[in-house]
Amino acid sequence: MSSRRRGLKPRKNKRSVQKMKTNSWFIAGLFVLSAVGTGFLYWFRVETDARVGQSVPLSSEAPNHALFDEVLQARVNAKGQVDYAGLKASPDKLEAYLDRLASADLAALSYYEQLAFWLNAYNALVIKGVVDRYPTTSVRSVKPFGGFFYRLKFQVAGKPYTLNEIEHDVIRAEFVDARVHFALVCASAGCPTLENRAFFADTLEERLETATFNFVANPEKVRLKRSERRLYLSKIFKWYAADFTEGYAGVTDFLADYLPPDDAEFLETEEVELHYLDYDWTLNAQR
């Protein structure tokens, strides 16, 4: 064999090269999938408040909402906007109130006492959920796809609950009153206005009526265009349409009780189209 032929470099097998490339792409793909999966699990993990799982005996004292009342008066303005920055800096009163919620015994409470308790619990825990993750611009930024409401767990009356469970499995299921939708505040501009007072049993009926009237009177939430024969509504009336059939023929029949008399008469005598307004998920924070 000549020296020239002995000096030739061996040729690479094309199949081996292609196999190496395929393996590299496969490994890179696995790395990407692993990173995506890790991110997915992080964003969709269930987060529990420190009180969840603690073996704290239920309190023998009736729930007292005075602490939450103080928090609301100090941190919520007339527009229903919350001073989340201030609460994050000084959370003691809110945390003390949440301690009471966690160990509350509801067995001996009346209907209105229980409803006031759960409405306050929901609103307080929404605030807690935002404060723990503040600054943020929306509850949708905390966890995607509504995870703020079903991926955060809190201890209430000795049991763990998500916000969705409090709203749907307790408040809507057990109390069956459409007006609660105007007392539950999900920390967003599209929600009802957060009042700067806690709910108490002795004034709850009046407060629910006032909250409903105020919501319906807000043109950003409800407005009737007679010339168009259109009724523009918050999506709350779409999402929970079934709740407005308890004692009513539907949403428009319910609204007739809370609109000005001439608008109510128009709804009762004319056909109107329902149009649902875009929901504003901007955080209800003080600017």
Image (cartoon, rainbow, N blue to C red):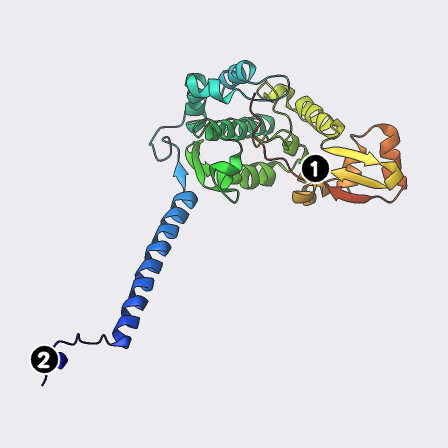
Q: Quadrant of residue 249?
A: top right
Looking at the image, is 70 positioned above or below residue 159?
above
Residue 47, position as x, y percentages in the image: 40, 38
Residue 146, position as x, y percentages in the image: 52, 42
Looking at the image, is 241 positioned above or below residue 4?
above
Report whether residue 250 is seen. no
Instruction: Tell me, for residue 3, which label it has, or none.
Output: 2
Residue at 53% from the left image edge and 17% from the top image edge? 75
According to the picture, the residue beneath numbered tag 1 turns out to be: 234
- Category of crowding for the residue at label 2, using alpha-carbon neighbours closer than 10 angstroms: few (below 14), some (14–19), many (at least 20): few
Q: Amino acid at mark 1?
A: Ser
Residue at 36% from the left image edge and 54% from the top image edge? 32
Report whether residue 21 is seen. yes
Q: Is residue 170 rendered to the left or right of residue 57?
A: right
Q: How far, Cα to Cα, is label 1 from label 2? A: 88 Å
Residue at 44% from the left image edge and 21% from the top image edge? 88
Q: Nearer the viewer, residue 10 or 60?
A: 10
Instruction: Find out whether the residues at labels 1 and 2 contact each other: C-beta distance under 8 Å.
Output: no
N-terminal-most mark, 1 or 2: 2
Residue 223, position as x, y percentages in the image: 78, 33
Q: Secondary structure at mark 1?
A: loop
